[in-house]
Image (cartoon, grey):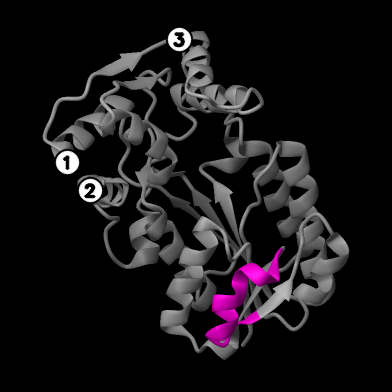
Amino acid sequence: MKLLVTGATGKLGSKIVDFLLKTVPASQLAVSVRQPEKAESLLAQGVEVRLGDFDKPETLEAAFAGVDRLLIISADGDNETRIRQHTDAVAAAERAGVKFIAYTSLANATESKNLMAPPHVATEAAIIKTGIPYTFLRNNWYLENEIGSIQAVLAGAPWVTSAGEGKVGWAPQQDYAEAAAKVLVGEGHENAVYELSGPLLTQAELVHALGDVLGKEIPVQQVTDETYAEIMKGAGLPDFVIPIVVGIQESIRNGSLAVESNDFEKVLGRPVTPINEALAQIVSKLN
């Protein structure tokens, strides 16, 4: 059985491949990447490296040829670009005769008002339309998304947010990667939708946990979206990124990531990494 992971040199993709290599022979595993030269270490381990560029749909059918089980990792970019890229990838998978598709989606995707939801809604619909068995891995929020704020705290700044009391199901990327790997190699996941969410926390609760890890009290500065935008601009974020980060804060404030679920534990076969432990791991890498 041939497994293939797209975007395998990215942060999430590389972690997923690491997990897969612990459970299946390298000869069973293929990856599709935009820049094969970045995957030389995988090639050296016996993984088949294929060119697959979501911006060049003509490369995708060949990349997916002979693949039984495919994991499509959602791409980066604006919503319009991602919808085009993802639907092209799904169409190529169908033409290549792929027998199962797992896809990294977003919490509560089809009902979500989250800024990032539209590409996931379109991709899930495109996959269902093919009739190919699937699993949607509706990833809530990577704890690593907060590294910028954690770094600011380590430098002595307060935790700044405009997300109010909105709750998030943070978990470390490692847990999401392990869940994806288990679904790709496991049985009984056909046509399943997994809401992968850690215990729900507000920004203040997350910061309290971070304070426990650092052994100090961290002030939380709740601001308006406008003030948040100004602070992010002052922190050096490019202009085009600012509406995105503000939109994410608004989406959290509006409850779009407050999805309670025990699917994570079901897929992993163990509890999600406790938030204090996950924060301690991130802090140790930053110090």
| Image-quadrant location for residue 237 | top right
Query: Mark 1 and 3 residues: CB-CB less than 8 Å, in contact?
Result: no
Q: Nearer the viewer, residue 68 or 231?
A: 231
Mark 1 or mark 3: whose residue is earlier in sequence: 1
Residue flagged by tag 3: what amino acid is it? Thr
- Outermost residue on the left side: it is 215
| Image-quadrant location for residue 3 | bottom right
Q: Nearer the viewer, residue 155 or 218?
A: 155
Q: Secondary structure at mark 1?
A: helix
| 157 lies above or below 11 | above
Per the model, the C-alpha gap separating discs 1 and 3 is 28 Å
* Residue 29 x/y as whole percent: 59, 82
Residue flagged by tag 2: what amino acid is it? Ala
Query: Mark 1 and 2 residues: CB-CB less than 8 Å, in contact?
Result: yes
Position of the N terminus by quadrant:
bottom right
Tell me the magenta residue range. Answer: 35-48
Local crowd size for mark 3, using a 10 Å CA cut-off: few (<14), some (14–19), many (≥20): some
Per the model, the C-alpha gap separating discs 1 and 2 is 6 Å
Asked if the magenta segment contains residue 43, the reply would be: yes
Q: Which of the labelled discs sits on residue 224, or is there none?
A: 3
Q: Which of the labelled discs sits on residue 213, or is there none?
A: 1
Q: Which of the labelled discs sits on residue 280, or is there none?
A: 2
> In the displayed structure, does residue 113 sit left or right of residue 280?
right
Q: Nearer the viewer, residue 128 or 279?
A: 279
Judged by its main secondary structure, the magenta piece is helix
Local crowd size for mark 2, using a 10 Å CA cut-off: few (<14), some (14–19), many (≥20): some
